[in-house]
Every structure is written in structure tokens, then in C-alpha cells.
Amino acid sequence: MAKVRISSVIDAPIEKVWARIRDFNGLPSWHPRMVESEIEGGRKATDIGAVRKFKLASGPIVRERLDAFSDDDFLTTYAIIEHPAPITNHTATLKLERITDGDRTYAVWTSQFDAPAEKADEMAKGMGENVFQGGFNALKSFFSGK
């Protein structure tokens, strides 16, 4: 099983960061690698079990299911259910924590999944650098005004 854990400090209050990322259908509004998204079946983006289908900037389509969501805990957990890469048994959690020193946000994005042994490390590295850190970098840039 491959595991990914990326963390970052975002120089903005947790409520503002959460407001930016909490919409399960809103990836294209804050993540540069996602260009369009829709929730299937007319469900709400906060409904547990809702499936989002989004297009990556590079072209492929990905489908993910919302497994947990909490405004109180600033947390979302989802599973990839369709991806062009050979990923199975995927689960990921994006969680924010309050940093009281300076009213900043500590963000942690974790994932675990099964993949062919010869590709697992490369896929985990790509997910960590391109998706997770790429998202955090976009958030840091947004909140710094750069």
C-alpha cells in the first residue's frame, strides 16, 4: 500500500482557508490542475456518498466519492473511484488545523492506495508533489495575493 502525507502552513485564518476549499465540487476554483467539475446525480456537494467527476488540466477524467465531511473539524475525506492510473482502494483526507500563533492554518493532506508495486512509489510522489503540494501552493499564493 502506497502512502502520501503532505503538510503546509497557509498564512490565513482557518475559516478563510476552509471557505475556499470546503466545496467538494469546487476544485477548479482553487486548484490549478483541475479545470471543470460536476457532482453526479443532482446531489449536494456536502452529501456523503456524492460523486464528483472532474477533468484534469492534462485531459483525463477522475471520479471521486465523498466519504466524510465536517465543517466543525475542517475535514473532508474522499475515495478515488475512477482514475486513468491503476489505483485501487484509495482514500484521502484533507484536514485543516488552527495555528493560534499568527492566526494561520496548518493543512495536512494524506492518502493511501494500492497500485502495482513497480509504479506505487512514483504514483505516490506524483500525487504528493503535483496534487497535494500543488494545491497548497495555490492556496498560499491566493492568500498572499501573489
Image: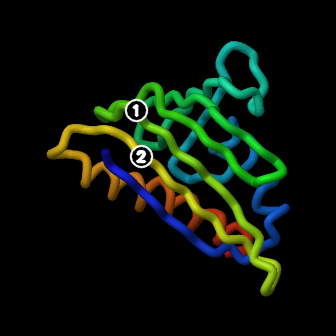
The residue that appears at 56% across and 67% down in the rendered structure is 137
Instruction: Name the residue beneath numbered marker 2.
Output: 112
Considering every residue shown, the one lying at the far top of the view is 41
Callout 2 amino acid: Gln
Q: In this picture, is 9 found above or below 62?
A: below
- Binning the other alpha carbons within 10 Å of mark 1 as few (below 14), some (14 to 19) or many (20 upward) gives few
The residue that appears at 75% across and 16% down in the rendered structure is 42
First in residue order: circle 2 vs circle 1: 1
Q: Secondary structure at mark 2?
A: strand
Residue 134 placed where, x, y %? 50, 61
Residue 3 placed where, x, y %? 38, 53
Q: CA distance from mark 2 to mark 1?
A: 8 Å
Q: In this picture, is 89 found above or below 107?
A: above
Residue 64 placed where, x, y %? 54, 31
Q: Secondary structure at mark 1?
A: strand
Judging depth in this view, the residue of 8 and 143 nearest the camera is 8
Judging depth in this view, the residue of 125 and 48 nearest the camera is 48
Do the numbered discs 2 and 1 sit on residues whose CB atoms are within 8 Å?
yes
Q: In this picture, is 103 found above or below 111?
A: below
Q: In this picture, is 31 found above or below 96?
A: above
From the viewer's perspective, tell me whether residue 53 is left or right of residue 12.
left
The residue that appears at 63% across and 33% down in the rendered structure is 67
Considering every residue shown, the one lying at the far left of the view is 118
Q: Quadrant of the N terminus?
A: top left
Quadrant hosting residue 140:
bottom right
Instruction: Name the residue beneath numbered marker 1.
Output: 89
Callout 1 amino acid: Asn
